[in-house]
Image (cartoon, rainbow, N blue to C red):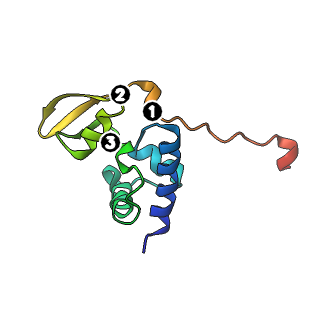
Amino acid sequence: MASNRAADVAEVLWELKRAGKLATLSAVAERAGFNPGADGKAVRKCLATIRREWSHLEWWRVIEDDGTAEADSEQVQLLRTLGVACGDARKGQASLMIDEELIMVWEAPEELPESVTA
């Protein structure tokens, strides 16, 4: 059974799919309401669960914070369908060349006027 965090990340993936966008591990964790963990470990664990339990969700839309992906991986192949190019691989990692328009930007929630909170 999936964790609450995985369900929250699944919701974020659904948003990304509908928008046709990508997001970093840290941005996905923030949107889902938790800390990404050391080197994104918490998000990676959620993505593994999602791949297993909700295979229709596009897990590959979540990219490393440093803009790299495992060279010649399934993720790289899928990202290429969106027009993402990959640079030379170093130590098994390829740098992703992503158009800024493909990166999801969530608006910060607007603060309530003081009269409403007082």
Q: Residue at x 45, y 69 (%)?
A: 3
The image quarter containing residue 75 is: top left
Instruction: Look at mark 2 in the image and give the residue it sits on.
Output: 98
Q: Are marks 1 and 2 in contact (CB under 8 Å)?
A: yes
Mark sitting earlier along the chain (1/2): 2
Label 3 vs label 1: CA separation? 12 Å
Q: Position of residue 12 (x, y in %)?
A: 50, 50
Residue 11 vs residue 24, the one in the foreground: 11
Q: Position of residue 26 (x, y in %)?
A: 42, 45
Crowding near the residue tagged with mark 2, few <14, some 14–19, many ≥20 C-alpha atoms within 10 Å: some
Instruction: Look at mark 3 in the image and give the residue it sits on.
Output: 64
What is the three-letter code of the residue carrying label 3? Glu
Q: Residue at x 45, y 54 (%)?
A: 35
Q: Which residue in the rendered view is the most extreme toward the bottom?
A: 1
From the viewer's perspective, is 108 left or right of 31? right
What is the three-letter code of the residue carrying label 1? Ile
Dot 3: element = loop
Residue 12 vs residue 65, the one in the foreground: 12
From the viewer's perspective, is 54 left or right of 114? left
Mark sitting earlier along the chain (2/3): 3
Q: Position of residue 79 (x, y in %)?
A: 32, 37
Mark sitting earlier along the chain (3/1): 3
Task: Please tell me whether mark 3 or mark 1 is closer to you in this view.
Answer: 1
